[in-house]
Each structure stands twice: as C-alpha cells, then as structure tokens.
Amino acid sequence: MAIEDMAFLIPVLPALAFVLTFFLGKKLPNGGAIIPIVAIFASFIISLMITLNLLQNPEQVISQSYNWFAILNVGILIDPLAAVMLCMVSFVSLLIHIYAVGYMSHDKAQPRYFAETALFTAAMLGVVLSDNILQFFICWELVGLCSYLLIGFWFEKPSAASAAKKAFLTTRVGDVMFLAGIILLFSDIFRIYNGSIPEGVYVLRFDEIFTHIPEIAALNTQIFGFQVSHLTIVTLLFFGGAVGKSGQFPLHVWLPDAMEGPTTVSALIHAATMVTAGVYLVARTFPMFVAAPYSLLVVAYLGAFTALFAATMGLVMNDIKRVLAFSTISQLGYMMLGLGMGAVIGITAVGDSLFHLINHAFFKALLFLCAGSVIHAVGTQDIRQMGGVRKVMPITFATMLIASLALAGFGIPGTSIGVSGFFSKDPIIEAAYLFGESTENWMPYIFSIVAALLTSIYIFRLIFMTFTGKPRTNYKGHESPSVMTVPLMILGVLALVFGALTKTGFGKFLEETFTNNFVNMDIHALAEIGKYHLASHGAGGEPLLILWMPVIVAVAGLLISYLIYGMRIIDMSGIVSRKNPIYKLLYNRYYQNTIFTQFLAVKVVYEGLALAGRAIDRGFDWLVDMIGYIFTEASDGLRQLQTGVVQNYATSVVTGVSLLIILVKLILEVF
Amino acid sequence: MIPLFYYLALSAIIFSIGLFGFMTQRSGIRMLMCVELMLNAANINLVAFSSYNADLTGQVFALYSIALAAAEAAVGFAILMSIYRVRDMIDLDKINVLRW
Amino acid sequence: MIRMLNKHFTVMQILTSVYNFFRPRIAGMIIAILFLAIVLISIGFTNWNTVDQLPQNPMDQSNIQGIGMLIFTDLVVPFEILSIVLLSSLMGAIYMAKGDGTE
C-alpha cells in the first residue's frame, strides 16, 4: 500500500477519535485519552513518512481530488509546505495530548476535553492538507469552533464563557472577510472562463487559482477613485481572515483573553497550531500575494507593527499566561513580517516564515506547557505570587529556560551554534534589513529589532520572577508527574536543536512548494505583476553589526531583565505604578479593550445601529400594526352581522337568494 | 283542468307567507308554525309535479316529508319547552348568546 | 278584537289594524313580496316540460294503492330509515320536554 493512499487518514483518524472519545470516553480511564493519542500518533507517523518521502523525492507531491458537486471538489494536497505543517501539528498535538493526561487528571469533563481536542486536531490537519480554498475555509471555521469550545471549556466561569464569545466574534470579523475574498475570487475565475467551466476544472483548487493569477490581477475595480486590482482585494481579504485568526493588530484582542481555557488548550491552539493557520493561509496563497500590488507591504507593515505592539504589552502583564499570549501575538507578527519580506526576497520568505512558525510552535508550546506545569503546581497564574519555583520544579525550570532562550534567539551568527529561535528569527530580521536597504524604508527593521529587545526583556522577566528568588507566597509546589515532564523534555530538545539541524535544508525544501511541484510558478514574473522589485542577491553580505544585532539585543534584554528582576539593582517601583501614564497605558493594553467594548460595542453598535434598527423596526411595526388594525376594525364591523337571531339569518339568506336570481336573470337577459 | 302554474303559485304564496312569518315573528311557536307552512308549500310542489309527471314517487316523498315534519315539530317544541323552562319565555330574538 | 268586530266594525279600523300589524314588519314584508314576485315570475316564464293535463282515471280516482306499492317495494329503505328517525326524534323530544323532574 503506497503511502499516498493513506494520506487521507491523517485528518480522518483524529476525527474518528473524536467520535469514539465523545461516546466511549466516560467508560475508559483518563477520559479515553488513549484513543486520540493513538489516532494522532498514527497521523504523525503517516505525516512523517510522507515528509521523508518528499525530502527524498521532491516531485512526489500527493494531490488527490474528488468531485464534490458541480465545479467544486474535495481533495488533499501534500506538498512540502503542507507536509512540514502536518508533521508539526500532529507532533505538537500528540505531545500536548500526552501532557494533558496529567494536566487534566483532576477534571471531571475529561472525555469532553479529549474529544474536542481530537476534533480540533482533525480540523487543523484538514486545514493544512486542503487542496482548495473552500475546503480550507470549512476546516478553518471548524478550527475556530473548536477554539471557541475549548476556550469556554470551563464554561461555568463567566470569564471563560465571555472570553470564548469574544474569541469567536473577533475571529468572525476576519472570517467574514476571508469568505468575501473567496466569493470574489470565485466570481472572478467564473468571469475569466466566461461562465462556462470546462469539464474536470475545479475553480477553487489552488493550482487552478494560481494559473489564473495574471488574469485576476488584470481585473480592476474603482474604489475611491483608485484603480484597485482584484487580486489585491482578494489577497487583502484573505489577509483579513489571517489577521483575525492569527491575532494581528486590530483583531488581536481575543488572544490574551483566550487564556481562560486550560493551559494545554492555550499551548495547542493559541500558541502552536490554530493561530498559525493565518500565517499558513498567507503562505499557501503566497503566489497571489506576490502578484498583488501593495498586499505584501500591508502584510509586512502590519506584522512588524504587531510584533512591537504586542511585545510592549507583554512587558507589564502579571499573568504568566497573558505574557505568553502577547509573546505569541508578537511572534506571529514576526511570521507575518517574514512573509511580507517576500516583497524583497521572493519565495525565500515562505521558507523563513514557516521555519519560524515551526520553531515557534515547539518553543511556545513548551513555554505554555511549562507555564501549565507551574500553574498546576503552584495553583495561581500571577507571577507576583510565585518566585523560587526553580527549587521545587527543576525539570520545568530547565525546559522553560531553553524555551525562553529559543524565544529570545540566542546563538552565534555564522555558525551552527544557537537555539532554534535564533536560526528562524535571524533570517526574518535580516530580510527586514534587506528590505530597508532596497526600499529605504527602515520601519520594519527597526520595529523588529526593538521587538526582539522587548521579547528578551519580558521573557526573562517572566523567568526571573517565577523561578528565582524566594517564594513570595506560601505554596506547596511539586514537580509534575512524568506524563507531563516527558513531553516537556522532548519539546525542550527540539527547541534546542531543531533550528540548528534543519536550518539549511528547511528553506530549500519549502521553496520547492511553488517552484518544482504541483504548480510551476515563476516567482519573478509574478513579482513583476505585483510591482515588487526583488533583490538581486539573497540574505548575506550585510555588515557584521547587522548580523550580530539580534543577538546583541537579546543579550541586552537578558541583562536588563536580570538587573531589574534578578538582582533587583534597578528599582522599578517608581516606574511600575498606576500613576505612570506609560505603565498604565501598557497595563491597560492601550485601552483597546475599552475602545472595543465601550466605544465600538456600546456607542456604534448598541446606540448607532440600534437607533437605525429601531427606526426600521418602528416602520415595519407601524405597517404591520396598520394592517392588523384595518382588519380588526373591518371584522369588528362585519361581525355585527352575527346577531345570533335566526330570523336575521333567514332574512339575509332570502334576500341573498332573491338578489342572486335577479342578477343571474339580468346577466342572462342582457348578454 | 287546473294548470300546473296554479299549484306552483299557491305553493309560492304559502311559502312567502311562511317566510314572512318566520322573518317577523318573535315567538318560537309561531316561527315553528311558519316553518311548517314553508314545508307544506314544498309538499304541494312535490305532489303537483308528481301528478303532472305521472310518477308516484313524488307523492311518496311528500308523505315522508310530512312524517319528517312531525318529527321536526316534536323536537322543535321540546326545545322550546326547555327554553321556556330556563328563560320563562320563548322569544327567540332574545336568545342570542351565539351572537358575536 | 271580538268587541271591535262587534261594535266598531269599520273598514277604516280594519285597515288601521292591518297597518299597525305590518308597520313594524315592513322590511320583512318587502322581502317576502320580493321573493314571491321573483318565484312567481320564474314559475310563470318557465316552460314546464310536463303533460298538459292531469292523468285522468274516472274509474279509480285513488292512487293509494300505487303509493303503497311504491313504499313497500322501491322506497322501503327510506321508509325504514324514516321510522328510525321518527323513533329517535320521539325519544329526544320526550327526553328534552321531560325536564329533570324538579320543576
């Protein structure tokens, strides 16, 4: 049996596990955790085999399509891009499932938890191996649903329920944009074919879309006096979906609140997999973005801004998971920035960004799992009440330290020494430098460097405040059971060495996604359409300072953090107070929550829309009332005829009969 | 020889008298009487057509309808007695609880 | 009425009493006369498809025998049903007229 015949099992097995766990979970130990673990392990093995096969034979892309109805299809597509995502998703999901056996051991609703995470894994794998944008969207929505269910897993807590609602509604804004993009794309391709689609052509398949990029780019629409290419509109709408899912700047508000869910959920969905779906979407449709004017620049600027913006808020959070949530947003901004750098370095950007995505998945899942371990032991999420956890949880401390180093990006440029984050973040920052060099626009580079400094500061603040010093409250900590620490160690090893091991092969492997396989894209020709000027030379050849810059800022951040929180040499009490406006601004997350709820929700939606709605409502009300009024009045008059007196009825009958006869007679006579 | 028209005219006149009484009288008994008048006007028609068509079925039916009229009158008067017992009068235009 | 007939019997009074009888019933009268007129006109202008004259049988004017034969041959089922109707109406009438015995 060839491996490609088993490819469809990758999402189907977790989906089956969902059904089985849902119905049988109560009767099995640990809420039936064994079912999804086995299913996802099988998915992981299949994904790994496919990936290894692809590494050796890059042309053996798995592409299977089946007619769904009319001109739409279902199918799977596993090219290098999908393959690495499949491996990452199934692997991280597997580890987190194993970890959750320990973490969720005290929860009564274990079967529900494992069923929902299994469904999530199935949906996420479905997103990754979709071969058409519609199937992608369906799985994308399913992923969002699982996210909603799992954020609200402890729905008895009002904060969890409202956080789930918030996450769902906020991502919905993006999803609606995504759907609008799909609809526009569909109608455009329909128009290109003049409405008659040949037999066997599935209009929303990725290869079909990509072959029509030049024609879609040629379609224009007048918007505010500007000729805007349809491709730009479609890609920006897609990016809107990605913004919602990946927590980029205007729609990031749901991600910190999503931490109300179990920590394992945060690790799986809101750090490693689901939030990267937006990045994956942009990477998947990268040829469209390259060919669309302005789109990649929007991606780049928004990514850079989000990276910095979220990092500033991460500085002041006291909730261990919130810090990590902002860190996730910031790192997702890096990934978006990396993709946006496709404006300069072309297809290499996908490799850079996805490399960071994979590494981030490992170290951020690790960070979350460590945080979960700490929370599990200490019983609080507030880092001000921790301190000195290192002594009771040595394994957790070690793995968390590795993850933090990976997040901050420590390493030595030019060698193979470094943690995984170093090898993936560096190319993005270097690409930003290249971008600045070629366009004289240094904003992305400066933002990414400052964000790197802040990243280092906030993550070591977390480390110092949690693990070092003396306990600030009385807690009874203990090291987590081995079912929790073993996944930590596995992830720790990966966070440490994955980047160094794969730094050369990964980018090349991913570049084959769009060059040799499945569709043969000439990225330079596409960039011509998009009016981007690709740099003639790749990364490298920058001044030594630029190469060292990310490491310098990382070390500087570590030092600053150590001075403030480790040694307590610099006294922060003057700065960390509610009176400091900057602190207050950051602590209140730039008041964005307030703006969203107080202004957008209350003023615009409640009062503005409600007023308009009330006017319409009253109008219809009046109409309906009038119709009802007319009929009640008319029937009120008519029912007076029902006197209840038999004679009156007889009179009416006789009169009626007489008149009828006269009438008939008249008609017969006259005509 | 009496033409058919005379029978029919007689029947129509009796029917109209019954109708007039039914529409104008208040007392239940009078109304029942008027109903009987109308019924018998119909019977006259039946017999007249029966004779002129040389078919005895019509006359048989006239007999039947007379019997039915008896039954109807029996029930009607029983109802009127019940009404009288409850309301102490048989003015049917006052019995209008079925009004709107 | 009797006294009126005896002592003050004038045409005027008869007319007056007739008028007094019909005055509140003028609507009903109009409708009844209208109906009568319509029926009479209809009857009069209809071409009845019947024999001109009654079938004459001077020897035996009675048709009781024929009716009897008809009742007990062709129309025996309606006859039986009629008997049931009569019986049930009789029972119903008795039941309703009897009252509950409290008086």
Image: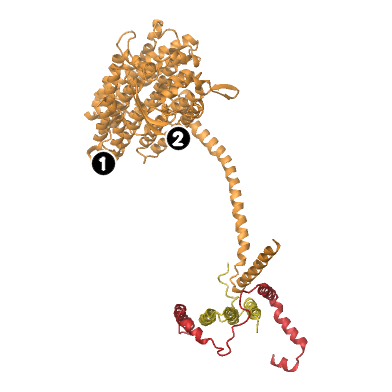
Chain colours: A orange, B yellow, C red
From the top left corner, tell me how far across and down residue A102 is, in percent. 25, 33
Q: Relative to A72, say whether A360 is above or below.
A: above
- Amino acid identity at mark 1: Leu
Q: Is residue A87 above or below residue C15?
A: above
The tag on residue A102 is none
Residue at 40% x, 37% y is A159
Q: Label 1, label 2: how many angstroms apart (C-alpha)?
A: 32 Å
Residue in front for this viewpoint, C1 or A465: C1
Q: Chain of mark 1?
A: A
Which numbered circle lies on residue A169?
2
Specify which label sits upstream in the sequence, 1 or 2: 1
Assess disc 2: are there few (<14), some (14-19) or many (≥20) residues with their C-alpha within 10 Å of its C-alpha. Answer: some
Q: Is residue A97 left or right of residue A143?
A: left
Q: Quadrant of residue B34?
A: bottom right
Residue A668 coordinates in the image, percent (x, y):
67, 64
Q: Please state the horizontal and vertical placement of residue A594, each as a whole percent of the image.
A: 49, 32
Front residue of this view, candidates A133 and A379: A133
Quadrant where the N terminus of chain A lies?
top left
Find residue A24 and name its label.
1
Quarter of the image for the C terminus of chain A: give it.
bottom right
Q: Amino acid at mark 2?
A: Leu
Please state which of residues A442 and A532 is positioned toward the viewer in this rendering: A532
Chain letter, disc 2 residue = A
Can the viewer see residue A563 in this picture? no
Q: Is residue A15 left or right of residue A216?
A: left
